[in-house]
Structure formats: C-alpha cells, structure tokens
Amino acid sequence: MSETSPKLRAELEGIPTYKPGRPAAAGGPVAYKLSSNENPYPPLPGVLETVTAAAGAFNRYPDMACTELMSELAERFAVPVSHIATGTGSVGVAQQLVQSTSGPGDEVIYAWRSFEAYPIITQVSGATSVKVPLTPGDVHDLDAMADAITDRTRLIFVCNPNNPTGTAVRGAELERFLDRVPSDVLVVLDEAYKEFVRDIEVPDGVTFYRDRPNVCVLRTFSKAYGLAGLRVGFAIAHEPVAAALRKTAVPFGVSQLAQDAAVASLRAEDALLGRVGSLVMERARVVDGLRGQGWTVPDTQANFVWLRLGERTVDFAAVCERAGVVIRPFPGEGVRVTVGEAEANDIFLKAAEMFREEF
C-alpha cells in the first residue's frame, strides 16, 4: 500500500481551529454556560410548535430557495427579495462572501481582535488576512482600516457590535469610513448582535446598504432569536452580491425546521422585544456590578461583556469555572462573558469579586 497521502491545498496548513464555547461541566457545581453568547431563554412563543410540526417531514428536502423566509425578510426590511440570501448562520454567509470575492493574492481586512471565524474563512479561500488592531478602547480603528486598503483588497469586515469586545462604531464615523472605501471593495457590516444595541448613535447597517452597492449587511437568528442550534442567517445586499451568495451556498443548507422556526420567530416580535429588553437590563446590572468592583469594562452593545486581563486570563476563567460558570477565555488577551440567567450572572459577579481579592 502506498504511503503517499492525497494532495491537499497548501492554504489549509496552519488554519486556526475555531474554538466553540465550552459547555457547563457535568458532575461539578451548579454550572451555567456563559461562553457562547447564546440566548438563555427557550424558543419564542409558537416556534417550538412550528418546528415540531415540521419535524414529521424531514424525510423530504427543504425548500432550497427558502421562499417563505425570504418573503418575510423582504417585507420586514422593505427590500427586494432578490437582495436577500440565506445561509447556515451568519458565519456561513460570511464564508460565502469571502468565497465570492477573494482568492489567492487578494486581501481581506478586519479588526483584531474580532470574530475568530474571520481568519479561518479567509485562509480557507486562499486570501490573505490584514488584521488591524483595535483602538486602546477596544473599538474598531476605522481610520487605520481605511489606510490599510490596497489594490489587492476585496472585502472588509466591520463587526458591529464587535465580538468579543461588545463595542460598537457610530454612524458618523462609519459613514466617513465608507466614503473612503473604493466602490469595488465589498464592506460587510456583521450585525449579529444588532437587536441588543441601545446606543441611538450606533446605526442600522441597512440604512447604508440602500444607496451603497458595495455594502452588505449580515444578520442571524442565533442570538436574540434563540435559534443557535438550527443555523440560519441571512445577508441583505444589492443583487450582484446576493446572487453570488446564492451561487456559493451549499444546496439545501438551511433545513426546513430552521426556515419554519425563523419565520415563526419573526412573527413573535413582541415576545422578542421583551426578552431582549430583559437581557439588556441584565447586561447593565452586570456592567455596573463589575465597575463597582473596580474592573474596567468597555461599553458593550451586545449580549456579553469583555474584560481585558492579559496574562491573568486563564486564571480568571478557572476561578469562574470553580464557582460554577463557564466563560470564554482568549489566552493572553481577555475573557468574554455572555449575559445569561440572573442566577448565572450573580455567580459570575461573585467570582469576579473573589478574583480581585485573591489576585
């Protein structure tokens, strides 16, 4: 038998592994998972019943065109159906965007630290990542990102609010940035956490998309809508970009259960607003609690908080886990902590206070 292995693409060498949030430990103290930015609430009213009914037909392929969901989204955002494309979560759509725009020799710009999938999907396509450091306040440095544009730049991600820092760029600075971007470079406004934004100066990316053909907006049902396990996201973009996304989509990638759950979730808007409002109130309580203990916490517009801890990051995560909450450490940098149930947030705040006393 030959010992020669199949030839694989060289671009796959050294691709960083995506690290999902760890689940709560079994057999330990009462544990809560605050590591994946999940919504702690159950599905919105009517969603579980809809999915249960649809489950009886999963021997059939789903509607590949996502017809009902596309129509619902088009009406919700007042955009043409042809300007919408769906995918397996916003990260799935993000990968399709990179595949549609960038290959060997091309560059993709994004802030760092930002969403950890960006370097993975960029390298898989064979393109080159251009990482632009955040400002000292952990916000996108849009001036530096504009300065980084070259004739090889094909796509720019702006994660707003930013994962994992929760910080957001405001409308005036985003507009100045977009004015500096060449019209043949695609700017992707990744708004996975848009529903949690309360700063009135943080814009809705759809307003920029309307008169800028090089702007694409990403949204997801994984966070505020609580459908993380069903994997459905979407993009709003002008027709050439949306058409490219449909070409690069995995056929039948969005299951019928996911489509039906997303439609039902869109129709439960009042319940959604109530739940998001509760999480925003908990977010304020957590931030105030941490700052009251002496922590420096960036203003967050997402459903999580960020603590820059440097070399103390792993120790802090260990203290939290022993207390009963699992958080998301980025070794050498900091921790991201999801705003969860009130009980989980209480445990986290106590662990943070204990850490300050001990370390």
Image (cartoon, rainbow, N blue to C red):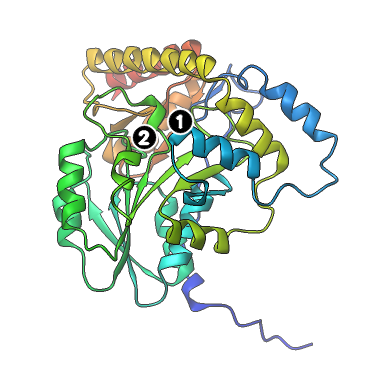
Quarter of the figure with the C terminus:
top left
Residue 294, horizontal then vertical, whole percent: 21, 18
Horizontal relation, residue 200 to residue 125: left or right:
left
Quarter of the figure with the N terminus:
bottom right
Determine contact: label 1, label 2, CB under 8 Å. Answer: yes
Question: What secondary structure is found at the residue carrying circle 1?
Answer: loop
Residue 331, horizontal then vertical, whole percent: 37, 44
Q: Could you classify mark 2 by the number of other residues whose Cα lies within 10 Å: few (under 14), some (14-19), or many (20 or more)?
A: many
Can I make out residue 136 in this image? no
Q: Which mark is residue 226?
A: none
Question: What secondary structure is found at the residue carrying circle 2?
Answer: strand
Q: In terms of image quadrants, where is residue 317?
A: top left
Residue occupying the point 67% across, 86% down? 4
Residue 207, horizontal then vertical, whole percent: 30, 39
Q: In terms of image quadrants, where is residue 45?
A: top right
Q: Which residue is mark 2?
A: 335
Horizontal relation, residue 250 to residue 100: left or right:
right
Q: Amino acid at mark 1?
A: Ile
Q: Which residue is mark 1?
A: 327
Q: In the rendered view, would you say 92 is above or below 167?
A: below
Horizontal relation, residue 35 to residue 201: left or right:
right
Q: Amino acid at mark 2?
A: Val
Residue occupying the point 34% across, 16% down? 286
Residue 153, horizontal then vertical, whole percent: 28, 68
